[in-house]
Image: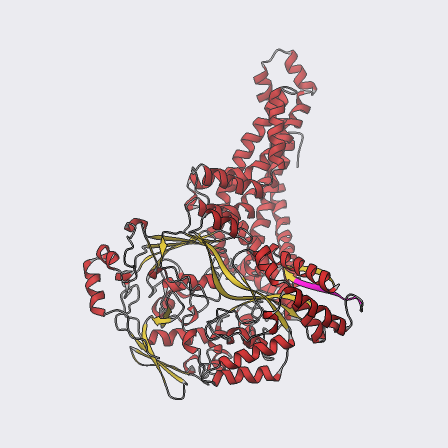
Amino acid sequence: MFIKPTMMASAAALLLALGPTFAVAESSHVAAGDVLAPADQQTFVSRELDEFPSIDPNLIQDVSGNDVARQLFEGLMNQDDKGNLVPGVATGFDVSADKMTYTFHLRDDAKWSDGSPVTAKDFVYSWQRAADPATASEYAWYMSLMGIANVDDVIDGKQPPSALAVAAPDDHTFVVTLSQPLPYFPQMVVNAVTFPVPQKAIEQYGADWTKPGNMISNGAYMLTERVPQEKLVMERNPNYWDNANTVINKVTYLIINDENQALTRYLAGELDKTEIPTGQYPRLKEEYPTQAQSFPLLCTYYYNFNLSDSGPEALKDVRVREALSLAVNRDVIVNNILQGGQKPAYTFTHWATAGFEAPDLPIMDMTQDERNAKAQELMKEAGYGTGGKPLSLEILYNTSDAHKALAVAIGQMWKQTLGIDTSLKNEEWKTFLDDRGKQNYEIARGGWCGDYNEPSTFLDLMTSTSGYNDAKYENPKVDALMKDARLADNPEADYTQVEQIIAQDVPVFPVYAYASVKMLNDKIHNWPVDNVQQNYYVKDIYKVQ
Amino acid sequence: MFSYIVRRIAVAIPTLLILVVISFILMFAAPGGPFTSERPLPPDLLANINAKYGLDKPYWYQIIHYIWNVVAHFDFGASFKYKDQTVADIIKQGFPVTLTYGFWSFVVAVLVGVSLGVVAAIRQNTWLDYLAVGISVGAQALPNFVLAPMLVLVFTLWLGWLPGGGWNGGQWPYLIMPVIALSTSYMASIARITRSSMLEVLNAGFIRTAKAKGLPMRRIIWRHAMKPTMLPVLSYLGPAFVGMITGSVVVDVYFSTGGIGLFFVNSAFNRDYSTMMGITILVGALTILFSLVVDVLYAWIDPKIRY
């Protein structure tokens, strides 16, 4: 695949020469017929839950850090409003015949905020730094997931960072060699950990390079102010190559821990975007139909069964697991509890994932009454529940009202349909992770968000070697299919088959597919509603009058 | 007096050391660690990160190493969670914020609380007394995590008078709601203690004597009754002051002030050992300092007390 530059460089240069006022009016992002709000109103204020653990691209591992990094920095490729790859610093890339070498062609007008050019060497430096054990980035595993040749040896310190198979044959060519073909590799370069970082500033300021005044960045915006646990402010980067087409002048992230408080401040006009607390979407949709929004978000909510030796005997019987899954009325959960536009999930992979074709599973075509009947039948065969051996199961979740509401509802459904008792156990986050990771549970909730828009980001969890396979599920067929998918031209069939196997083995059961439920100022246009990762670029949005 | 202060400071040092050691033990006992995450890190990577933060060393070594760094270099280390900041950065940034709203909350709580208490005591069993007691009971019954969102609802959303949160260097519009939210329940307690203390004092023999001498009421209250009234109030104010200036997680959460209260609570949830230790030492040292200040003030107010 090679993506052609969307803009002619000469036009951009002309707009730049005319100054920012003209540039705003001429922006290529603005839809015909939209009248832009005046320049002083071109601001974007968003709420964040907590202080950013880091805004150093190589150290970022969370969604909110990525949100900030996408404005301050620009990687090889960006995403458009549908999540498709579009040029970033690279105008496009070529893939070698063996699918192991990717050559990115970098634009020659990309600049850092201090005016110096962004070159392929900056990417080489950044990628080596991300994998370097001296950086101690928790997100180094992502570099490993990208399958760059020698990456694991570099992370483990067996080879120096310079051994990483990335090269800059000239200033505008960046070459990556993989250890094996990876069809979704290009999708992975939109993550912050792969963004270029300024060697000069890092060497000059050390860990303080991310502070305002020290930071040099190559994105559409520059960091101007940061007060931990209060706010982070950025303003236009005049050296950004596409500055002429950027409309929003100032971006502010306000850290507001309490989501109800954030909603009040949104309604008072202090914010342009905030999340809607669970259960409030229907009311807000009615009162503010153009502002309350729900978009699919690439995450799945599911329950794990502990299949390891420490798990209960009953859960080793697949009939019990299937019955428990069938008896959960997902429609009630999404329509009566969550009420935020989420969808019932019957596959582990989120329905909106690119390149995913859901198999036609029997559970999907049944009514809930049919599912309940089948569940009762299976449970009877297994000899548990009503009329059989009594069964009591414990549901473990991390402390939260939303998780509790779901656990209570699911427990009720099991009691009513199958005559099974459940007890609930909630734990504070880190204790919960510790217990779940050590299989110190019977049934535990889980939530998984895609790192990139491709089914393997979900289905890799089901392989026996995955460190995140908390159910301790092992099926050689799944392992083989996932391995095959990496090399296949069309891995869709493999993924569909894996979902079928999961539906038969039920090591986990999906409950619902997430939605991003938020209040969004209706004066903001061009928000990427169809980008299922909700990766937004403020440079692409604008405010109308 | 001087030797007493020196002695108290000498005792403070081992107290702080014990505090550090106990905090460390509790920290290590808590399940999970700073790098436990939804997605467990590969063992090699985790080992490398643990090594970088010194978590691969035995516990006793970590404790001694930490104390040595603090004592010899005044180095509290880097935050495990907020990687762009050191613990010193966090305290330098957050503590002045907390100190500012804590100080003003204290001033408001003392001024309003003492006034209400005195008025209620002097006008006992009149409508003024009932009003003052009513206000104080109401304020006491209203937890600040209820009061804070109510304030924002009224003053930001409905009236539009004040910003709903933020700090902006502590400008007064940003200070008003945090101060009200933090001071209200303290104010209520101060009012109740002042009232009952003042009532007791007003019934004492020396006040009766003063009244019999024909002194004006204003003079009796200010010259004679105030000082003894303040004694029980003072023993409440010492810990209250430390409580206010060392941060309120409720204020930080609801008003996004950026104070250390939220950092402190989050550090425990995040297993951010270094931040947790840094703020623990700060709060511990302030607690010790202000309990000493209160004891010295005691001696000043009540000549009967001698050390």
Residue B276 pos. (x, y %): 57, 57
Left or right: A490 in relation to A106: right
Name the chief secondary structure element in magenta: strand
Left or right: A117 in relation to A506: left
**Front-most of residues A334 and A39:** A334
Left or right: B237 in relation to A241: right
Regarding residue B121, the answer to whether it shows in the image is yes
Is A395 magenta? The answer is yes
**The residue stretch that appears in magenta:** A390-396
The residue at the point 63 percent across, 27 percent down is: B133
Left or right: B127 in relation to A76: right
Rendered view: A279 above or below B31 = above
The residue at the point 38 percent across, 88 percent down is: A97
Count of numbered marks: 0
On the image, which quarter does residue A248 sit in? bottom left
Rendered view: A342 above or below A504 = above
On the image, which quarter does residue A481 sit in? bottom right
Judging from the image, the colouring scheme is secondary structure
On the image, which quarter does residue A476 sit in? bottom right
The residue at the point 53 percent across, 84 percent down is: A483
Rendered view: B101 above or below A235 = above
The quadrant in which the C terminus of chain B is found is: top right
